[in-house]
Image (spheres, grey):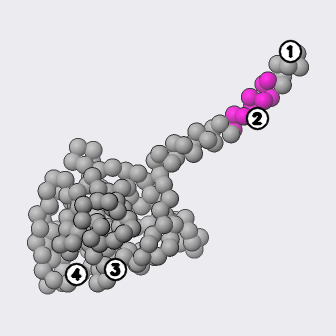
Amino acid sequence: MNRSTNEQKYARRRKSPYMVAVALAIVMFMVVAPEVNEGDAMSPTINDGQLLVVSKTSYSAKRGIPDRDKLVILEKNAKNAQNVSKDNIIARVAGLPGETVEIKDGKIYIDGDEYVTENGIKGSDGDLKVKLTKDEVFLLCDNRDKYIDSRNEKLGPVDMKDIKGNVLFCIWPFSRFGGID
């Protein structure tokens, strides 16, 4: 081997990690994105100013539906979303397509069964009964007494195509680093 061939191999090896890092970054930003939470709608689960990592998952009756209790982000340009907030809305999926959501006597029922989230947040004011279509989900904020979600006619049930993605974990502040339920 001559000197020129060795230099070429060394140059290729030096470039290789950088090319892998760039390719990985491109793929990563196609799959996940950072999102800063604005407001306390999901308090105490997520607080104002937390930096989150969000998967860019799209949902529909054909592509799949979000899991119950999954935290999702609603596009700020979604139908009726402008009535509620100028920012993206983060909320918890409570009702799934085809289900009946009923709020009665301060309790939430999904197809007749009382709905209680894993973190124990439950309850709601007012009475409501809505049958979701095959493309709709019912979203609830954790801070239910202060924020508008699917219980209010300003937002109502949400079409799954208007969901931007779901929250994976928090990366800032470090004291809250990790998965979010």
Q: Amino acid at mark 1?
A: Met
Crowding at dot 3, Cα within 10 Å, few <14 / some 14-19 / many 20+, comes out as: some
Looking at the rendered structure, the secondary structure element under dot 4 is: loop
Residue holding disc 2: 14
Circle 1 is placed at which residue position? 1
C-alpha separation, residue under disc 1 versus residue under disc 4: 77 Å
Tell me the magenta residue range: 8-17
Residue at horizontal 84%, vertical 25%? 7
> Is mark 3 in CB contact (under 8 Å) with mark 2?
no
Name the spot of residue 147 as percent of width and height, x first.
Answer: 31, 78
In the image, is residue 16 above or below residue 37?
A: above
In space, the residues marked 4 and 2 are separated at their CA atoms by 59 Å
Amino acid at pointer 2? Arg
Q: Is residue 16 left or right of residue 68?
A: right
Q: Residues within 10 Å of mark 4 (few under 14, many from 20)?
A: some
Could you classify mark 2 by the number of other residues whose Cα lies within 10 Å: few (under 14), some (14-19), or many (20 or more)? few
Q: Is residue 150 visible?
A: no
Name the residue rendered at 24%, 61% in the picture.
Answer: 79
Which SS class for mark 1? loop
Q: Amino acid at mark 4?
A: Ser
Residue type indicated by callout 3: Asn
Say whether marks 3 and 1 touch (CB < 8 Å). no
**What is the chief secondary structure element of the magenta stretch?**
helix
Q: Based on the displayed image, in which of its 4 quarters is residue 110 positioned? A: bottom left
Residue under the point 20% across and 84% down:
125
Residue under label 3: 143
Quarter where residue 175 is shown: bottom right
**Above or below — where is 15 with respect to 99?**
above
- Distance Cα–Cα, label 3 vs label 1: 69 Å
Residue at 42%, 61% (x, y): give it.
167
Q: Considering depth in this image, is 159 or 123 the residue closer to the camera?
A: 159
